[in-house]
Amino acid sequence: MTATRPPTAAESRAASDSRAAPDSRAASDSRAAPDSRAASDSRAAPGSHAGFAAVVLAGGAARRMGGTDKPALPVAGRSMLERVLAAVADADPRIVVGAAAGLPAGVRATREQPPGGGPVAALAAGLAQLPAVGTGSPLAVALLAADLPLLTSDAVRQLRTALSRASRADGVVFVDESGRAQFLCGVWRPPPLRAALARLAAGRNGVLTGTSMRALVAELAVTEVSWRGTGPPPWFDCDTEDDVRRAEEWIR
């Protein structure tokens, strides 16, 4: 992910929280996500009281940081990966995709093949760890980058609640103050995610390596929401050492 500079507190509070994703970013057809209060269909709503899973992508190359194990870097005394996992402590299961060591008890680890295949290939590997539909599959899955040290459980709860109200949306993601959707800071319904991955794989001879997130979300109906909290933006990611220092300033 590319670091997005956080807005001021005033900007965060003033931002609208229910903009629909533009067609150019969210869908390749006319399936725009409708207003969450007006939409209704037969799909179960993964609200704040329903079970959810979490897939955390931790396999990036961190080229701008010299190839270091970026998720393991400490921010105000805790690694970025640890902070992300804490924000989804109530998810079951929690799955880390990447070369992660020393994970908390109960957290599963897997890896896309070949390693370094990109976020879509990593997502497919993570979803493969979830139960199949009809056998206890969670109603929602949080898809998160591992370098989001400002992510909180409140932010995840906002996304889950928004998805429960947007019954025709396949997923809900945060949007920053510039209007850029944060696809690796969102909550999704597993069945349409699986179907979109299958369509992409079918058009690429079964290979998802190198596929972009934009190609994936073009297959899906996405709703964008703005952060409604008073704290720092939960989608802020750390791609440089300066980003790490700025995140520490926000936390302190």
Image (cartoon, grey):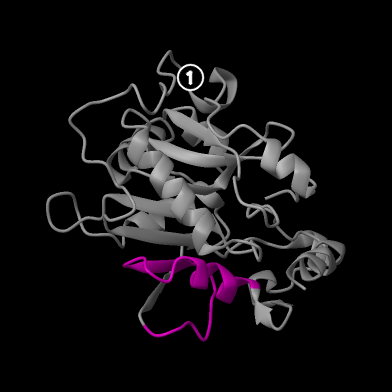
| Residue for point 58% across, 59% down | 116
Residue 205 appears in view: no
Task: Write down the residue under mark 1.
Answer: 28
Identify the residue at horizontal 83%, vertical 64% (top origin): 246
Q: Quadrant of the C terminus?
A: bottom right
Front residue of this view, candidates 140 and 215: 140
**Mark count:** 1
Q: How crowded is mark 1: few (under 14 residues within 10 Å), some or many (20 or more)?
A: some
Q: What residue type is labelled 1?
A: Ser
> Dot 1 lies on which element?
loop
Picture coordinates of residue 206, whole percent (x, y): 38, 41
State the image coordinates of residue 165 (x, y, percent, origin top left): 35, 36
Q: Identify which residue is drawn at 79% across, 67% down.
A: 244
Q: Is residue 15 visible?
A: yes
Q: Is residue 98 magenta?
A: yes
Q: Quadrant of residue 174?
A: top right
Q: What stretch is highlighted in magenta?
A: 80-105
249 lies above or below 134: below
Lateral position of residue 74 relative to residue 189, left or right: right
Question: Is 65 on the left-hand or right-hand side of 120?
Answer: right
In this rendering, is residue 112 above or below 40?
below
Work out which residue is located at the far left of the displayed protein and give it: 134
Q: Considering depth in this image, is 35 or 238 the residue closer to the camera?
A: 35
The answer to whether residue 243 is above or below residue 163 is below
- In this orientation, which residue lies closer to the viewer: 116 or 10? 10
Residue 7 point in image, percent of width and height:
78, 45
